[in-house]
Amino acid sequence: MRLDTRETAAPSGADGATASIKLRGMRGMIASKMLQSLQQSAQLTHHASARLDALQALRERCKAHGRAAPSVQDLLLRLVVQTLADFPALNATLEENCITRHAAVHLGLAIPLPDDLLVAPALFDAQSLSLGELPGARRALTEQARDGKLGVKALTGATFTVSNLGRSRVHHFTPLLNLPQVAILGIGGVEPRVVADSDGWRAVEVIGLSLTFDHRAVNGAPAAAFLDALCERIEGLASDAFDHELPFQE
């Protein structure tokens, strides 16, 4: 299946004052799904922040041992998948008044396309990918999306989605559910924060996390517990936590 991302726009005048873009084709489908998402679910968003000291330390350890350091994004995705194993209510879909909790994590990745379009295809069985395998699988999925080579199964098969703003001043935001999924995690920008330590005060980097969930399927307390657990994983990451996935040569 090849996605046609072309749009019809009325030409601007000589002064470039006006342009009209029709909500048709892929843009129309996205607009319809976003409206449907808000109209057919009970959405609520929790926000949290997590320090990145431990993730950055792991990346430095990789570099010190002559290994390619995994990106912060891939580390976060791996930790999200691990955390979902403890919170099956978040790795679920809701259709026809029936909640289905999925054993496998088919991780939806929000991927921007040209002309301000967006898709969120599934990285199937993400729980089976090691940290070393994850970057290649993510890049391959991104290339398929940008080449218009995604099939219907990939576009509709995710059980939980992650939307990453990347380098942005927006620390928290409200991602919209990709129905019939019951949860989506938004990863915001990084900002400095001053914290106390044994030597007084120091600056650390923290990342914003925003979990939107369908209140019909998940209550506020377990959604907050998921975010708490994810933050604890990010901040408490032991230096040897991924040694079995990224073996270091001493």
Image (spheres, rainbow, N blue to C red):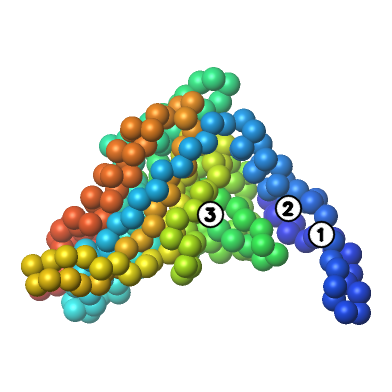
Q: How far apart are the two marked residues, 2 and 1, measured between alpha carbons? A: 9 Å
- The amino acid type, in three-letter code, at marker 3 is Ala
Q: Which residue is mark 2?
A: 27
Residue 59 is situated, as x and y percent measured from the top left of the image, at 26, 71
At 38% from the left and 33% from the top, the residue drawn is 220
Residue linked to disc 3: 110
CB within 8 Å, label 3 to label 1? no
Q: Position of residue 66 (x, y in %)?
A: 22, 79
> What kind of residue is marked 1?
Ile
Q: Residues within 10 Å of mark 3 (few under 14, many from 20)?
A: some
Q: Is residue 91 visible?
A: yes
The residue under label 1 is: 21
N-terminal label among 3 and 2: 2
Which mark is first along the chain, 1 or 3? 1
Look at the numbered disc 1 and give the secondary structure of its residue: strand
Helix, strand or loop for disc 2: helix
Asked if residue 149 lies left or right of residue 204, the reply is: right
Residue type (three-letter) at the residue carrying disc 2: Arg
Q: In front: 158, or 86?
A: 86
Q: Nearer the viewer, residue 223 or 141?
A: 223
Q: Are marks 2 and 1 in contact (CB under 8 Å)?
A: yes
Residue plotted at (54% across, 41% down)? 177
Q: Would you place residue 189 above or below residue 178 in this image?
A: below
In the visual, does 202 lie left or right of 188? left
